[in-house]
Image (cartoon, rainbow, N blue to C red):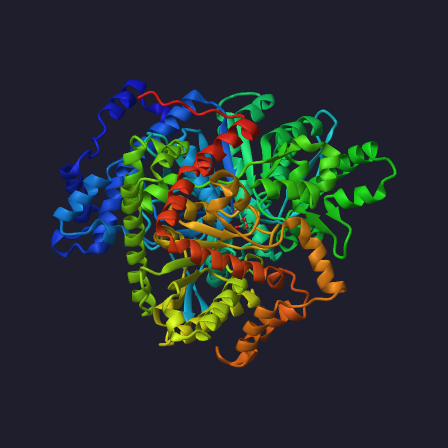
Amino acid sequence: VEASIPEPQRAAWSRNQIQSFTDKDGFEKEVVRHVETTLARSMFNCDESAAYSATSLAFRDRLIKDWNKTQQRQTYRDTKRVYYLSLEFLMGRALDNAMLNVGLKDAAKGGLADLGFRIEDIIGQEHDAALGNGGLGRLAACFLDSLASLNYPAWGYGLRYRYGIFKQEIIDGYQVEVPDYWLDFNPWEFPRHDVTVDIQFFGHVSKTTKDDGKTAAIWEGGEIVQAVAYDVPIPGYDTPTTNNLRLWSSKASGGEFDFQKFNNGDYESSVAEQQRAETISAVLYPNDNLERGKELRLKQQYFWVAASLYDIVRRFKKSKRGWNEFADQVAIQLNDTHPTLAIVELQRILLDIEGLEWDVAWDIVTKTFGYTNHTVLPEALEKWPVGLVQYLLPRHLQIIYDINLYFLQTVEKAFPKDRDMLTRVSIIEESQPKMVRMAHLAIVGSHKVNGVAELHSDLIKTTIFKDFVEVYGPDKFTNVTNGITPRRWLHQANPRLSELIASKCGGNGFLKDLTQLNRLEAHAKDAAFRREWAEIKYANKVRLAKHIKNVTGVTVNPAALFDVQVKRIHEYKRQQLNIFGVIHRYLTLKGMSVEERKKQLPRVSVFGGKAAPGYWMAKQIIHLINAVGSVINKDEEIGDLLKVIFLEDYNVSKAEMICPASDLSEHISTAGTEASGTSNMKFVLNGGLIIGTCDGANIEITREIGESNIFLFGNLAEDVEDLRHAHNYGSHSIDSDLEKVFGTIESGTFGTPHDFSAMIAAVRHHGDYYLVSDDFHSYMETHRLVDESYRNQDEWVSKCITSVARMGFFSSDRCINEYADGIWNVEPLVVQE
Ligand code: Z57
């Protein structure tokens, strides 16, 4: 079809494209046009929802042009592309981002005002795209923003879940999960019914002899599921580059119905088959840092990986290059081990379908892939039973065994007679049942492996991947410290602060070169500037206070210190330490005279975050937080001095409101457990200080902003092992203040004590694996320092300004440039306008 349209004709068409709007009046016309034609409604009954739809469609039209041009440019120039494979993309809302990146938010604001709407209300209509659990998925979203903003030719590949992460409701203090049906109306995706891939499952492998006498494997039989592409435009900030995020949706192959069965009167089973196929992309697994080994999850992984690789190979083949150029044209990054089957799938394609020799193919494969590890927690490391892989992907299992054989042969040569070494590094764990260790496969099949913060990258080299450092040498392992996009997390989330910063940094340049924030440093001692700064923080707190009032009914004082911990609920992140600390604070206040109380600093403790539905202990923690809140918040003796809020359904759009409103945020994981953390960066960038442990990126944040600008406490990663050993084999005495907290809970102050006994027992009787008791004293002491410091507002605000000024390093732009240089070997595609 493409070829049949003569070139001059095509060129004429593209010159005559309808011009998009460039100002307020043009925007209004487009909104009216979309309301009246696309949406088939009258302007007389255009409500906020219709205004959202029409505004999105107007901006979408603009994006499409840049998007098409970007794809044309990338095809024409045919430079190396990056493919970011991630099972999660936690995108949040798209409209505000599109308006800011395109640079026409003011036009839209004015136009919507003319039509009788407030732009915030219209933006607020959008449902978050929540195709992720937490940090890993949000990192992927920040990376897409940076890749586009820096003009890298890049694609994201993921799954188009019908249900993203569940919506959390809090009922009687307990988490209740509600399905997140988000696809009702989504103007940001484009179905590509012409871009489909047939994906095979099950079946068997037979051998055949080719013309040249060699044998080849044939994978046949089984069932076919169709992958359909849905494309999402990813606009870069202040650049015409608009990249593509391709999400795969599953459906039964052979169209809507199997007509054979239909005609045979087996209507029901043909519909059932269709539904079974659609199940593959139906739901995001809601676990963060936990792998549960479900068959459907493995199906999702292969479905997505096979469709993506087919697409990547198809694109490469269009360039008519030889296979020896594949790794010069294609870089594929594995976001955790979830897409590790891509390594096996590419080897299969090159070997079985393209007929390359094993060694030639394997060389291409290893040059193509890079693997990012995001955790050292053993329960999060993926392993699949050999039997399940055999049953679902028989040919892939053979290839995995061959990869392992050749790998172990080289290890054997380097470490003769070291059976233990072979057992430890083997891709196959010789357990009952045998397991495929996905991290080992990912390491063996990649040319670079990276951790996500310095401490984490050191830890993987000395603990879980120690043997691989001996096998490959240290250079295969590297660090790329995480970053966040300043566009969403400063400019969009905190427009007033962004504007104030721009006024001192010589304009908006800092949004593309975050190191320019250092120009702020000179103003930290400027009293007038500090006043403006503090006023913005206060306004952001007022906004959060209103939200809290709306959703919980609790009145909080915006002048109080807002102390925030929002992230997935997990024992290693230690929300239990925080709530025990809150109880201790409450007891201290209760023990004071009225006079003494008057001298205390008012606080609001804000919590938010989802527990994995099957994570019982995490749900108990949520329950305790709510139970404590409902007692303290109505204690009239305490009043404003302490409020405890649990905000339900924490997500990206709520984070955009919460981060700018925090004075202090908590990043208090047991040292050595949080690979990086990224909300720590968001909070500091928005002018809040951190209380935290020496863990993940907190360490590098401290190095950048200075020790006097962060409240660090607790034991160090290097001491954790000894402490745990002492708990289990020595004497384990619990901190006496913590015992008082336990006593209060056990006395029934916060409801039936039995509800919380497991949380207490985890510390007292089950080895206190997360070192809550060990760190409690230092945690409370450090909170006292926070209070003291907050009393001196001038000093506090200077600390905040100085910290922001020194946060330049934590841009995801820096991070993406490091991947591009050190791992992908790709360059930006300069746009000539
Ligand atoms: C996830 O969100 C992270 C790691 C995982 O292994 C899985 Br599964 C999900 C997080 C880490 O816990 C954070 O510390 C890190 O900042 C984030 O990934 C991005 O690297």
Q: From the viewer's perspective, tell me whether residue 508 is left or right of residue 578.
A: left
- Looking at the picture, how far across and down is residue 382, in whole percent? 63, 50
- Looking at the picture, how far across and down is residue 211, in whole percent? 70, 26
The total of numbered circles placed on residues is 0
Dividing the image into 4 quarters, which one contains the C terminus? top left
Q: Residue furthest front?
A: 595
Q: Residue at x 54, y 59 (%)?
A: 779
Is residue 131 visible in this depiction of the protein? yes
Frontmost residue, 132 versus 766: 766
Q: From the viewer's perspective, tell me whether residue 440 is left or right of residue 568.
A: right
- Looking at the picture, how far across and down is residue 713, in whole percent? 56, 53
Q: From the viewer's perspective, tell me whether residue 295 is left or right of residue 102.
A: right
Q: Residue furthest top?
A: 8
Q: Residue at x 38, y 38 (%)?
A: 234
Q: Residue at x 29, y 65 (%)?
A: 550
Dividing the image into 4 quarters, which one contains the N terminus? top left
Q: Considering only vertical position in the picture, is 482 above or below 558? A: above
- Looking at the picture, how far across and down is residue 50, in whole percent? 22, 53
Is residue 88 visible in this depiction of the protein? no
Q: Considering only vertical position in the picture, is 703 above or below 716? A: above
Q: Considering only vertical position in the picture, is 831 above or below 756? A: above
Frontmost residue, 429 versus 453: 453
